[in-house]
Each structure stands twice: as C-alpha cells, then as structure tokens.
Image: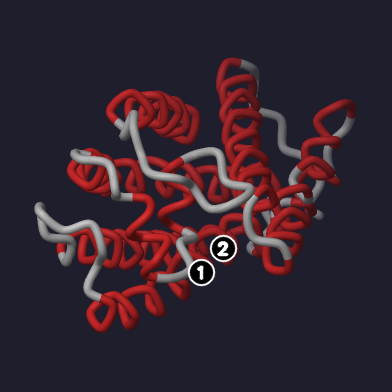
Amino acid sequence: LLSGLLGLGALLMTAFLWLIGPRQMGPLPPGFVTPIMAFEFVADPAEVGHLFSVAGAAAAMDRVNRWDFLYMALYNGFLIAFALACARRTGNRYFYAVAALPLLIWIADALENVQLLAITGVLAADEVEPVVDQLLPLLDRLRLFTWLKWGGLALYFVLLWPYFRGLQGRARWIGVVGLLPALMAVAALFSRGLANELMALAIGMMFLVLTVYAWKIAVAQPVVVAAA
C-alpha cells in the first residue's frame, strides 16, 4: 500500500512537471524530443547555447528542476518501498540490498539537479552564448551524475527479475518488461538521442506497471510467494 501511494504520487508529479515545463526551447540535439532529456544529456556548451536561445526557457527549466527535488523523493521512496515489500512477501533478504539502490539514485539525481541549476546560472539574461570555461566542468559532472541516475534506475528493474520470476501467471512478464530500460540504456551509450528518450519511456512505463501491481496486491489478500 505504501509503495502504491508513493507510486501514484510520483506519477501525478510527472504530469505536474510536464505541465510546468518549458513550452519553447531552442533546437534540440538530433534524436531528442523532450527538452528535459535533451538538457540532462547535453554534450557541450554549444548545445547549451542552442537549447536556451529562446527567452524564458532557462527560467522554465529551473522551475522544473527545483520541483524535481520533491519528485525524486516520491519516486525513490516508491522504489524503496516496493523492494522492501518484495523482501517481506518472499522472505528473501536479497531485496533489502535492492532497496538500498534507490538511495544512491536519489543522491545522483540531487547532484544532477545541482549541475543543471548551475549551468543555467551561468547564462546571463542578455547573453545567448554560455561562458565556455565555466560550463565545461559542470557538463563533465552532469554527465557522470546523469548516467548514475538513469543507469541506476535501469539496473533497479533488472534486479527485480528474481521476484517476478517467482510469481505465477501474467505478472511474471513484468520481470521481462523490466529488462527493456537496461537494453535502451546500453543503446544510449553508443547512440545518443532517440535511445535516451526510449530509455526514459521504458523506465516511465515500469513505474506505471509497478504502481498498478502494487495497488493490485494492496487491495487483495497478501499471499507469500516462494523466495527466489
């Protein structure tokens, strides 16, 4: 029930962030379709300049990233609670280790946001081109923390495989679907752009599926499954 509530909160927060997000941005890098993903995976100062060449885009992006601190608490709380519920239902201590991973994702996401806010902070209101010397170290750190976050999320769903493998019926297929984010993450490492967007889409799909599953279990009589 707790994981279901937090998951629902995270999904509602996703919609809220989309509503307050920037409506107009400069040209996105090839393959990207959402401004937030394009910013998180921005490659160089020139791309930063292109993204925020539209007046008001940086302020709108800052608004999203400030609210994101609440969002990361909701979605990581959901992931922690879900893994702990898996441990409780199976009696398998392995899932306590899985529950620790979102804590690292949380830290990486927070540090990622610090870099994003710092990048927009170096853009003067009357300038189009960013200050290259200031942006380069920020972009290096952003690349690290962004991949720790997204890679950690992809890994989390892979680590849930033993739980869903121990179930009966259609729920077993959730574990198979949970492998998609990791596959997209590997593809994104070699081909930046559309693969990053598909990775985020697959992760979002898993949040939805796990939230529905959590509510289904919460309203039904709890049944202890065999430990994987």
Colour theme: secondary structure
**Residue in the picture at 74% in, 45% down:** 178
Would you place residue 151 above or below residue 223 in this image?
below
Q: Residue furthest top?
A: 219
Amino acid type of the residue that numbered disc 1 sits on in the rendered structure: Leu
Q: Residue at x 49, y 62 (%)?
A: 149
Q: Residue at x 26, y 83 (%)?
A: 133
Question: Which dot marks residue 148?
Answer: 1
Quadrant of image for the C terminus: bottom right
Please provide percent x and percent y for residue 68: 30, 45
Q: Residues within 10 Å of mark 1 (few under 14, many from 20)?
A: some
Q: Nearer the viewer, residue 180 or 119?
A: 119
* Quadrant in which residue 111 is drawn: bottom left
Where's residue 164, x and y in %?
A: 79, 43
| The quarter of the displayed image where residue 54 is located | top left
Please give the residue where the numbered disc 2 appears in the rendered image: 152
Q: Do the CB atoms of the residues marked 1 and 2 lie less than 8 Å apart?
A: yes
Residue type highlighted by circle 2: Gly
